[in-house]
Amino acid sequence: MGKQFQKVTPSVQEFISKQKIFFVATAMKEGHINLSPKGMDTFRVEDERKVLWLNLTGSGNETATHILHSDRMTLMFCAFEGPPKIVRLYGKASVYHPRDEKFAALIGKFPKLPGTRQIFEVTIDLVQISCGMAVPLMAYEGEREELVRWADDKGKEGLRDYRTKKNSFSLDGLPTEIHKK
């Protein structure tokens, strides 16, 4: 049977810190739902009610658009090794771009990664733990290096051009505000 909490407990934080992958889900009232897997060293528990996620440049930018229209975000962590468990964090998200003061205040909490695009800050209103007994056991082999190499090869201007082409609008044609002044 599932358990619910209003905050990230120490045991939940410990579980999260051991996971190599997490999933981010957002949606607007209309349009496509976005669900994305995330990895690398891009997640931080700030305190029992606040988490941060460093978003890297990718093929789309749905999450940023969704948060402009609805601040709801769900983050999910699954145990693929060890005892079965799923942790979901439900909350209200804000997005910060490199142009924002808050981004500058938060970026030092993460390793320097090429392709850094945004930081999402989520204020948690519900933590749900469920069994995860249907989640398969899988062995972790390591981080993929392709995204870091790709971003390094693109360079600052190449990433800006890529974001202009691929990250300026959502699947539903709405602006992401990636280059808003």
Image (tube, rainbow, N blue to C red):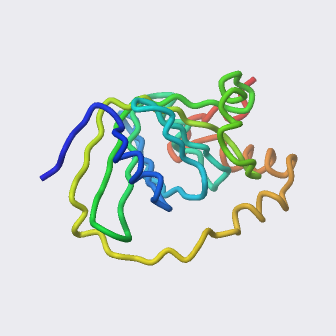
Q: Residue at x 40, y 32 (%)?
A: 48
Left or right: 118 with respect to 120? right
Q: Front-most of 162 and 47? A: 47
Q: Residue at x 68, y 42 (%)?
A: 117
Q: Front-most of 132 and 66? A: 132
Q: Residue at x 82, y 58 (%)?
A: 152
Q: Quadrant of residue 101?
A: top right
Q: Residue at x 76, y 52 (%)?
A: 114
Picture coordinates of residue 151, whole percent (x, y)? 77, 57
Picture coordinates of residue 69, whole percent (x, y)? 46, 28
Q: Determine whether 179 is above or below 133 in the image.
A: above
Picture coordinates of residue 142, whole percent (x, y)? 59, 72
Q: Front-most of 79 and 94? A: 79
Q: Quadrant of residue 83?
A: bottom left
Quadrant the C terminus occupies? top right
Q: Determine whether 37 is above or below 145 in the image.
A: above
Task: Return the residue found at the far front.
Answer: 10
Callout count:
0
Left or right: 93 with respect to 175? left
Left or right: 162 with respect to 20? right
